[in-house]
Image: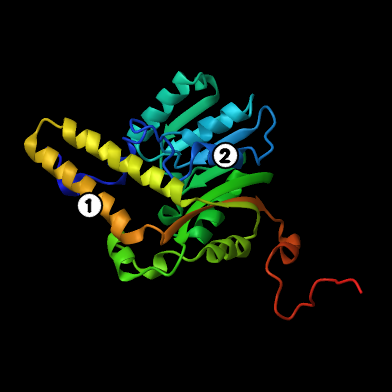
Amino acid sequence: MTAYDEIDSEAVWNRLDDAEHPIVNPVSAESVDRLLNRVPLAPGAHVLDVGCGLGAWVLRALELHPGTRGTGVDVSAAHVAKARAAADKRGLADRFDARVGDGTALPPGDPADLVLCMGLCDAFGGVRATLDRLRPHVRPDGHLLLGEPFWERPPDAAALAALGIGADKHTDLDGVVAAALDAGWAPVHGYVSTPGEWDGFVWACVRGLADWGFAEADPAARRNILRYMADYRDAWLQGYRGVLGFGTLLLRPVPAPLRVFTGRRPAWAAGPWTRD
């Protein structure tokens, strides 16, 4: 029997492909394409997806950039199996390697031309810790595509209760950018998910849970799954909808001598040049 407390994010996301939303983030397929096309990847380039989920990001990168190769790492064996199946179905199996592993403890290896890390900063211990840990895995001339939740507006009690977190769990969008600058990265592009993308993602999760629950043969399990589905839906609608945002930053590593030019201008520094 499936108990209510046994259902978690992995169980929800494993059903996203069945709900026609294999992207385990509130980002549309069109936005994924636009973001991935911002990165120049030549044939032979390597894409590393840390916490690859169902493989949507890395597999699409391989489709958009012919001749590239990709590696996906995820702690969920179920996610990795689905990513491999998707690669085989899309004719990408010969260019894609999916591995079960802890993305926060990657062994040393050749740095990648593009590293993807979408919504995994919490597992690393925050944005700064994520960027510090991933830096050795990005080529000096490479890019990191980082996805991270942030507060669209100060969270109220309903939002915090729905998410089960404190207000200090996230910052606003500028706080995410500031953490990247402090860690020695230059944001060169950014995107904030729209309300429609959030709705599409959450409703896909709700649909996946509903399909699972209504198809469950065991009556007790059916009740538990459908109760979880309803609570998941209402946490969104009555709690954090319009409060929690999701931003994606395209980052480049900055050599230490150049960081004074790519970071925030110190208060004591002279203003930018102006023309008379």
Which part of the image, by quadrant, shows the C terminus? bottom right
Q: Farthest residue to the right: give it.
A: 276
Q: CA distance from mark 2 to mark 1?
A: 42 Å
Q: Mark on residue 109? A: 2
Mark 2 or 1, closer to the camera: 1
Asked whether residue 139 appears in the rendered view, the answer is: no
Against 33, residue 193 (above or below) is below
Q: Residue at x 52, y 22 (%)?
A: 92
The residue drawn where x is 15% and y is 40% is: 2
- In the displayed structure, 99 sits above or below 276; it is above
Residue type at mark 1 is: Asp
- The numbered mark at residue 157 is none
Left or right for 140, reference 249: right
Question: Residue 261 in the image: x percent, y percent?
Answer: 75, 64
Q: Place residue 180 in its image quadrant.
A: bottom right
Which residue position is annotated with label 1? 231
In which quadrant is the N terminus drawn? Answer: top left
Q: Nearer the viewer, residue 250 or 155?
A: 155
